[in-house]
Amino acid sequence: MNARLLRLMAAGLMFGSVAAVPAVAVAHGDVTPQAVDTTGLDKLGADWREANPYRGNGRAVEIGSSAFNQNCARCHGLGAVSGGIAPDLRFLEKGDAGDEWFKERVINGSIRNGVTYMPKFGEALGQEALWAIRTWLETVHED
């Protein structure tokens, strides 16, 4: 962290307000993916599916809710209600069209101008956990 940023953060703490710290997204630092127990879900193998194979699966919804809170909520918000740091995933398109975007993003992450906005989660969590998250996201979808 650079000295200017540290001074701004200290000033915000001294005055009892983080409002004094302009748009600092500390949440996008090093993130260690938390393991997800996918017991009860069909194993999907090494090759990524093109569409969500767990759509409508109650066990996947349960696992996906927990996995989202462990790995995604710090940026995308509890219940997928974003506070503005990252996209609000309740508005992610349902069905196969949304699956395509979701798959691309969780496998490749989001890196712009050398800055990691979202790490690559594909290898770290595996497709069972990530498709379970996608299954849960569809239960909180809003138009």
Image: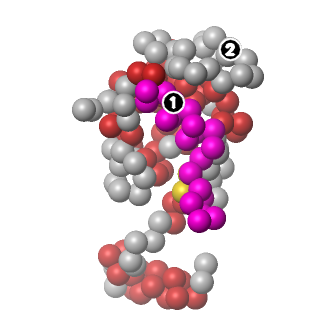
The residue type indicated by label 2 comes to: Lys
Nearest-to-viewer mark from 2 and 1: 1
Q: Name the residue under label 1.
A: 100
Residue sitting at x 53%, y 24%: 132
For the question of whether residue 116 can be seen, the reply is yes
Per the rendering, the mark at residue 43 is: 2
Tell me where the magenta segment starts and ends, as one range: 97-116
Q: Where is residue 73 in the image (x, y as percent from the top left)?
A: 46, 45
Residue 21 vs 103, above or below: the answer is: below
The one of 45 and 1 positioned closer to us in this rendering = 45
For the question of whether residue 37 can be seen, the reply is no
The residue type indicated by label 1 comes to: Glu
Specify whether residue 99 is painted magenta.
Answer: yes
Quadrant where the N terminus sits is bottom right
- In the figure, is residue 109 to the left or right of 43? left
Q: Where is residue 98 in the image (x, y as percent from the top left)?
A: 43, 30
Magenta span dominant secondary structure: helix
